[in-house]
């Protein structure tokens, strides 16, 4: 596995894939990028990266995963200008990838969507207890909602962001 930059085409495909994987009405979706490795990574490094990626996926799509919780929120309850926000979880991204991640992506007017990157690594997730991991995810998502609120305000979207944040807080009981 080498290093590669993500083109706009890649981002568009990611959004289209996420949209087809979700219900038409869900305002939130989730995407997980497994750990990136250099082409000369050892088998142990590859195995550890896969284990961490698999473990993190359980927090997103497992029995008590956050993606299932987020499906309770429908975009039509919050306006028409934002119909999909994709939480993009990057598990142990390489330094190169980190340099190119934004706190929040640009609003895509045509798709009425936005990407919300979240970095997952040993320091903020894997070296924590179960309770600390869930707390980190909850707090990070709520912080990202503040960034989303700035985009909504700046772009003058009709999204009822305060209601969305309040509803999100209510359903995040994990």
Image (cartoon, grey):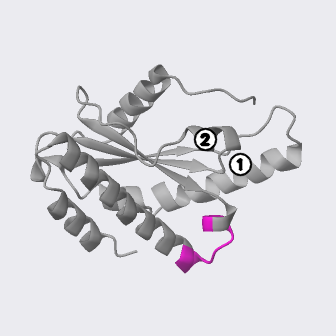
Residue 160: give its label.
none
Q: Position of residue 47 (x, y in %)?
A: 79, 49
User: Which residue is farthest front?
Assistant: 154
Q: Position of residue 105 (x, y in %)?
A: 39, 40
On the image, numbered disc 1 is attached to which residue?
50
- Picture quadrant of residue 123: bottom right
- 25 vs 115, left or right, is left
User: Which quadrant is home to the C terminus?
Assistant: bottom left
Q: Residue at x 47, y 66 (%)?
A: 137
Q: Is residue 64 visible?
A: no
Q: Residue at x 40, y 25 (%)?
A: 12
On the image, numbered disc 2 is attached to which residue?
99
- 89 vs 147, left or right, is right
Tell whether position 98 is magenta: no
Q: CA distance from mark 2 to mark 1?
A: 23 Å
User: Which residue is farthest top?
Assistant: 9
Mark 2: secondary structure? helix
If you read the primary sequence from the N terminus, does the residue marked by circle 2 or circle 1 appear first?
1
Q: Residue at x 87, y 43 (%)?
A: 43
User: How many neighbours does mark 2 have within 10 angstroms: few (below 14), some (14-19), or many (20 or more)?
Assistant: few
User: Which quadrant is home to the N terminus?
Assistant: top right
Q: Is residue 57 visible?
A: yes
Q: Which residues are magenta?
A: 124-132
Decide: is 162 above or below 151.
Answer: below
């Amino acid at each position: 596995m080498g290093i590669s930059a993500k083109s706009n085409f890649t981002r568009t495909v990611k959004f289209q894939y996420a949209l087809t994987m979700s219900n038409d009405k869900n305002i939130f979706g989730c995407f997980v990028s497994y750990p990136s490795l250099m082409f000369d990574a050892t088998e142990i490094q590859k195995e550890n990266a896969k284990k961490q990626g698999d473990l993190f996926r359980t927090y997103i799509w497992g029995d008590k995963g956050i993606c299932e919780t987020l499906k309770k929120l429908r975009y039509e309850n919050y306006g028409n200008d934002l119909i999909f926000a994709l939480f993009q979880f990057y598990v142990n991204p390489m330094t190169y990838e980190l340099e190119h991640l934004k706190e929040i992506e640009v609003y895509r007017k045509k798709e009425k969507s936005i990407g919300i990157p979240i970095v997952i690594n040993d320091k903020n997730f894997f070296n924590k207890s179960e309770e600390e991991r869930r707390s980190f995810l909850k707090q990070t998502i709520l912080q990202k909602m503040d960034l989303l609120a700035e985009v909504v305000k700046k772009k003058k979207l009709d999204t009822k962001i305060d209601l969305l944040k309040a509803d999100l807080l209510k359903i995040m009981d994990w």
